[in-house]
């Protein structure tokens, strides 16, 4: 499971197993580099395991002090705000959210630049509520995708003009497929 973690001005992509078992050593990928980690659930601490030049393994702890999660209408993922006591005891405020294809476009939408709207799921387009050239406000329902007999509303992540409509009613779509853009 990939996570996008923002700490100060740096953003990291962390690929973790879908389930962490307390006390077990596991492999993870941090910004494309493999790392060995261990999670201690009781102590709320993640240990980065590193081999020193002399041979023994050194454990660098990152302690989780507090977690707050928020989810806003129109956002596909829950965002976690974390306070951690990192390596060398520094207290860091950071945020984490699930990382998916198109994540960069969601960030662009917050800056007012063009963004691509993607389907969060595989399904069938039941209803398209906007057309090329329409103005949509942030939070406006753009279309409805049916998956497993459930209707899923796709919201505008930012205000702007609809363009490059790539789907029609009745069309099947795959998860992360481009649906349209907002400029």
Image: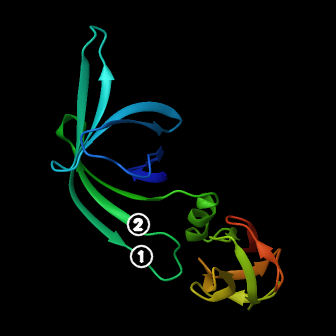
In-front residue for pair 83/145: 145
Q: Position of residue 83 (x, y in %)?
A: 25, 56
Residue denoted by label 1: 71
Looking at the image, residue 34 lies above or below residue 164:
above
Looking at the image, residue 126 lies above or below residue 26:
below
Give the quarter of the image for residue 51: top left
In-front residue for pair 7/54: 54
Give the quarter of the image for residue 122: bottom right
Determine whether, in the image, residue 110 is placed left or right of residue 115: left
Determine whether, in the image, residue 15 is placed left or right of residue 107: left
Looking at the image, residue 53 lies above or below residue 107:
above
Q: Residues within 10 Å of mark 2 (few under 14, many from 20)?
A: some
Looking at the rendered structure, the secondary structure element under dot 2 is strand
Could you say which disc has been placed on residue 79 in the image?
2
Q: Earlier in the sequence, mark 2 or mark 1?
A: 1
Q: Marks 1 and 2: in contact by CB < 8 Å?
A: yes
Tell me the distance, in whole angstroms, between the alpha carbons under discs 2 and 1: 6 Å
Q: Position of residue 33 (x, y in %)?
A: 49, 31
Q: Which residue: 70% across, 75% down?
A: 123
Q: Which residue: 42% across, 52% down?
A: 5
Q: Position of residue 163 (x, y in %)?
A: 80, 77
Determine whether, in the image, residue 101 is placed left or right of residue 51: right
Quadrant for the C terminus, please: bottom right
Q: Position of residue 167 (x, y in %)?
A: 82, 77
């Amino acid at each position: 499971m990939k996570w996008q973690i923002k700490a100060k001005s740096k953003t990291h992509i962390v690929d973790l197993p879908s389930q962490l078992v307390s006390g077990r050593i596991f492999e993870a990928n941090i910004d494309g580099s493999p790392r060995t980690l261990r999670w201690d659930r009781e102590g709320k601490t993640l240990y980065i395991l590193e081999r020193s030049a002399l041979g023994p393994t050194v454990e660098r702890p990152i302690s989780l002090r507090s977690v707050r999660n928020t989810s806003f209408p129109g956002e596909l993922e829950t965002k976690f705000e974390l306070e951690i006591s990192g390596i060398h005891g520094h207290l860091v405020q950071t945020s984490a959210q699930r990382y998916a294809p198109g994540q960069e476009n969601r960030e662009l939408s917050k800056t007012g630049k063009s963004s691509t709207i993607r389907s969060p799921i595989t399904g069938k387009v039941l209803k398209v509520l906007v057309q090329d050239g329409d103005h949509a406000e942030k939070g406006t329902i753009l279309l409805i995708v049916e998956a497993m007999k459930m209707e899923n509303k796709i919201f505008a992540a930012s205000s702007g003009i609809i363009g490059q409509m790539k789907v029609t009613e009745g069309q099947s779509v795959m998860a992360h497929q481009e649906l349209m853009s907002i400029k």
